[in-house]
Every structure is written in C-alpha cells, then in structure tokens.
Image: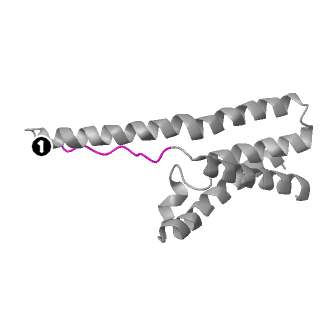
Amino acid sequence: MNKPLVSAFIAFILAQILKIFFNLIMDREFNLRAAVSTGGMPSSHTATVSGLTTSIALMYSPGSTLFAVALVFSIIVIYDAVGIRQAAGKHAEILNELTTILSEISEYGLQPKNLKTLLGHTYPQVAAGTLLGVFVGYAITNYL
C-alpha cells in the first residue's frame, strides 16, 4: 500500500466532508455543495499536502530528499491557498461591484455574471487543515 498517497487522499476526503459540518454549525445550513467548493473550514488543500508530507517524513525520515520535495511542494500549495487565492477573491469582489455599477448605467442591458469570491483560506482554516493532515498522515502511516 502506498501510505503517503492514501494519507493524502483520506485527508482530502475528510476535509471535504468536514466542510459540510462546519457549514452546518457556522451558517446553520445543510449544504452538500460545501463538500465540493473552494475555501471553507478546514482547508482541503492544506490537509492533503500535510497528510502526504507527514507520511513521507515518517516513512523516509525528515532528512530524505523525498521529504524535502514534499515539504517544498506543501509550502507552495499552502502559500497559494492562503495568499494568492485570497487576493484573487478580493479582486473578484471589486470586479463584481464594478460590473454591477456598469450594468446599472449601461444602455444595452448588460447582465454580468458574478465571479466567485470565496477562493482562498483564512489562517484558522489552514491551521485546521494542517492539523487534520498531520493526524491522518500519522494514523495511516503508523496504524495501517
């Protein structure tokens, strides 16, 4: 069995399922779409790469080249999840406002489609994803 791959996959699935329950708790709304959407608690991107990296660290040691590759990959994915994608969400909010204003003053009946604004993750969402991934990576590697 490829424990790092299984760890990553299970961490991803658990994070996506947990999004439904966090959405239920926070918004008091049962929304199955939360399981397939970007953003939300916990970060499935972070859980996935943390599970992979933890499993690799336990199997091959933190001094291995494979762990170094996984760690760098994880850092890039986490940075993207919290930084770049969050900025893209803020840009989408501004563009949505501008297109609304343009549609109101347009003579041609412009009907803009709003861009998705919840793209990135907050630091607590990333921290929760990291903890979930580390836990899953540890459990899969040591107990399966």
Tell me residue 124's x, y (percent): 63, 51
Decide if residue 43 is in sight here.
no
- Is 140 rendered above or below residue 5? below
> In this figure, what is the number of numbered marks?
1
Magenta segment's dominant SS is: loop
Element carrying mark 1: loop
How did the renderer colour the structure? one colour
Decide if residue 73 is in sight here.
yes
Residue bearing the label numbered 1: 109
Quarter in which the C terminus is drawn: bottom right
Q: Residue at x 63, y 35 (%)?
A: 79
- Is 88 rendered above or below residue 51? above
Residue extending farthest to the front is 123
Mark 1 crowdedness (10 Å alpha carbons): few <14, some 14-19, many ≥20: few
Residue stretch rendered in magenta on the structure: 111-119
Tell me residue 61's x, y (percent): 92, 37
Q: Residue at x 34, y 38 (%)?
A: 94
Tell me residue 54's x, y (percent): 82, 45
Q: Amino acid at mark 1?
A: Gly
Residue extending farthest to the left is 107
Q: Residue at x 52, y 55 (%)?
A: 36
- Is 132 rendered above or below residue 86? below
Residue 127 highlighted magenta (yes or no):
no
- On screen, residue 130 versus residue 64, left or right, reads left
The answer to which of 50 and 126 lies nearer the viewer is 126
Tell me residue 44's x, y (percent): 63, 50
Q: Quarter of the image holding residue 104?
A: top left
